[in-house]
Amino acid sequence: MPEFRIGEQDFLLDGQPFRVLSGALHYFRVHPGQWADRIDKARRMGLNTIETYVPWNAHAPTPGEFDLTGGLDLGRFLRLVGEAGMYAIVRPGPYICAEWDNGGLPAWLFRDPETGIRRTEHRYLAAVREYLRRVHEVVAPLQVHRGGPVILVQIENEYGAYGSDKVYLKTLVDYTSDAGITVPLTTVDQPIDEMMVAGRIDGVHMTASFGSRAAERLATLRRHQPTGPLMCSEFWVGWFDHWGAHHHTTPVEEAAAELDTLLAAGASVNIYLVHGGTNFGLTSGASDKGVYQPTVTSYDYDAPLDEAGRPTAKYHAFREVIAKYHPVPDAPPPVPPAPSLATPLGDPVHLFDNPDAWGTWQRHHALPRLDDLDGAPRLALLRTRIDVPGAAVLGFGEVRDRASVFLDDRPVGTLLREHHQRVLGLGSGTGSLSVLVEDQGRVNYGPRIGEPKGLIGGATLNGIPLTGWEVLPIDLSCPPPVWAGEQRTPVTGAVAGPVLLRAGFSLPEPADLHLDTRGWGKGVVWVNGFCLGRYWSRTPQRTLYLPGPVVRAGENEVVVLELDAMAEPVVRFVPEPLPGHTEA
C-alpha cells in the first residue's frame, strides 16, 4: 500500500516528493447526487486532492445520534474521491468555522452553561472524544496506507486566533491517534506570529491560511517551521456574503498570480474553495463583531466552480497556472443555461388562521429561549394574554435574532438583533400578544460561539414580567403539513405573512434550476420536500439554487413560507444564478 509522510522539504508519497494540489469541497454543501461531478471538475482543473471539513452539528443534531446517511455519508464521499484517482484531506475540527452554523459545534453541547468551548474542560472533551471516535471510524479505514485516499488529517482549526491551550490541542492529537489515524496530522493558522505560536503543537505539521501576499506569508510560515513542506492549506480565492451587504468577488488575475507565486515557491496548496456549494436548509452561520450579520444561503464564495458547479473564468485561469507546473486533464464541457419557467403560487394558509396545523403547542410559565425547546427550533410562535390600561411597552432582555410582534393577530412591529432592539411600543395593552421568533444563524467565529437563541432574559410589559406562555415550535426541516389534496387557488396580488403558499411545475426531465425570489420578502423555500434555504429581499442573493437531483421528471411542488410580505406571489426559474450586486 502507498506510504505518505512528511520529509525534510516535501511531502513524500512512496518516498518520492509529492506536491499537494488540493481544493476544498464540502460534501455537506453539495447534493450527494452531484458529488462525483464536482470532484471530476476539480480533477480537470489540475488538482490531485480534495479537502473537506466535517460538521459535527450536522452529523449529531441530538446527543447520542451520528447520522452518516444521504448527504452526510462521509465514507461514500471519500470513496468517490479515491475512485476519481485523487487523494483526500479531512478536517474534522471539532470546530470548523466555515461560515457554518455555530462553527460546526452542536447547540446541545452548551445546554450546560459550565461546558467549556475549545479548551481543556472535561464535559467538552468527553463529547469531543466521542465525536472524533465516530468520525474516524469512517476515516481510519480510508487512509492511504490502507488503500484509501486520505493523506492528511487536521487538528482543530485556526486555533491560534482563538486560544493557546496546549493541553487541549495535545488532547485532540491523542484522541485522533487513539481513533486509529496514523497519516500525518496538521494545524492551520494565519501567518501572524502570535497566532502561529498559539496554534502550534509539537510534532504536528504547521500550515498557513491566507489569500494574498503569498511570498511574504510563506516566509513567515518557514520562520516558524524551518523544515518540512510549505503549505497554504486555506488559499482564500473569494469570500462569503452577508444579508444586507454586497456579493464579494476577487479579481481573477490577482488570484491567479498569487496561486502562481505559491506554486513557483514549491509550496503545496488547498484552494478555499474550489467549489463552495450551498447552505441548504438553515445551516448558514453568522458574524458578530458588535453588529450581528447572518450569512446568506449561497456559499458561492466566488470560487472557480460557481454555486451550480459551473466552471468560471477563475477556473480556467487557475487551470492555466497549474498547467505550468503539472499536467492537467481535458477541461470539462460547458454547462448549458438552466430552464426558464413561471407559475403562480396559491393556496395561502396563514399562520394565525390555524396555528394548530403548524405544530404542537407547549405551555411554559416563563418565556423560554429556543434552546430550551426540544430540538432548538429555528422558528417558534409564542403567545400570552395581556391586559393593562392604555398603551404599553413590550420589552425583552435581548433578541436573537428576529422577533415579529402581533396583537390580536395583527402586526405591530419587528425587533432586530442587528439593530440592538429590545423594546416595542404597543398601541394597546389589552389582547392576545404573539411573538414569532426566528433564529437566523448561530455565530460561527469568536467569543459568541455557543450562545443560546431566541428571546433572552424574559419579557416584560411596562417593566412587569410577562408569564403564562403558550409556545408553538415550528419544524422547518420539511414544510408544515397544512394542506390536504391538490392545489386549487392561485393568488393574485400581494400576500401578507406569515403564510405558507405552494405551486406546482412540470419538466420533461430533471435539471438544475435557479429560483428567482424577486418580489418576495423574507422566508424559506422547499422543493419536493427538500429545503433550499432562506431568501430575503435585503440582498445580495436573489436566486436560490435548486440541484437537478431534487427535481423530478414530470410534476414537482414548491412550498414557500413568507414571513413578511410578498409583492409578487409567482415562482420564477431563470437561466443563471443571480448572486447579487458587487462592491464595484
Image: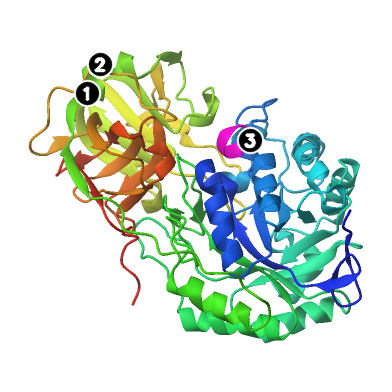
**Mark 1 or mark 3, whichever is nearer to me:** 3
Quadrant for residue 539, please give it.
bottom left
How far is disc 1 from disc 3 in space, using C-alphas? 33 Å
Magenta: main secondary structure equals helix
Mark 3 neighbour class, 10 Å CA radius: few under 14, some 14 to 19, many 20 or more: many
Give the number of the disc on residue 59.
Answer: 3
Colour style of the rendered protein structure: rainbow
Q: Identify residue type, mark 3.
A: His
Q: Nearer the viewer, mark 1 or mark 2?
A: 1
Which mark is first along the chain, 3 or 1? 3
Q: Dot 1, crowdedness within 10 Å: few (<14), some or many (≥20)?
A: some
Is 71 in the magenta? Answer: yes
Q: Residue at x 20, y 33 (%)?
A: 411
Residue 349 got which mark?
1
Helix, strand or loop at disc 2? loop
Distance between the Cα atoms at labels 1 and 2?
Answer: 8 Å
* Cβ atoms under marks 1 and 2 closer than 8 Å: yes
Q: Position of residue 296 (x, y in %)?
A: 41, 52
Query: Type of residue at label 2?
Result: Asn
Q: Residue furthest front?
A: 330
Identify the disc placed on residue 354.
2
Which range of residues does the magenta coloring cover? 68-72
Q: Tell me how many marks there are.
A: 3
Give the camera-side residue of 481 and 275.
275
For marks 3 and 2 on the same chain, the one whose residue lies earlier in the sequence: 3
Disc 3 from disc 2: Cα separation:
34 Å
**Is label 3 in contact with label 2 (beta carbons under 8 Å)?**
no
Image quadrant where one finds the C terminus: bottom left
Q: Which image quadrant is residue 473 in?
A: top left
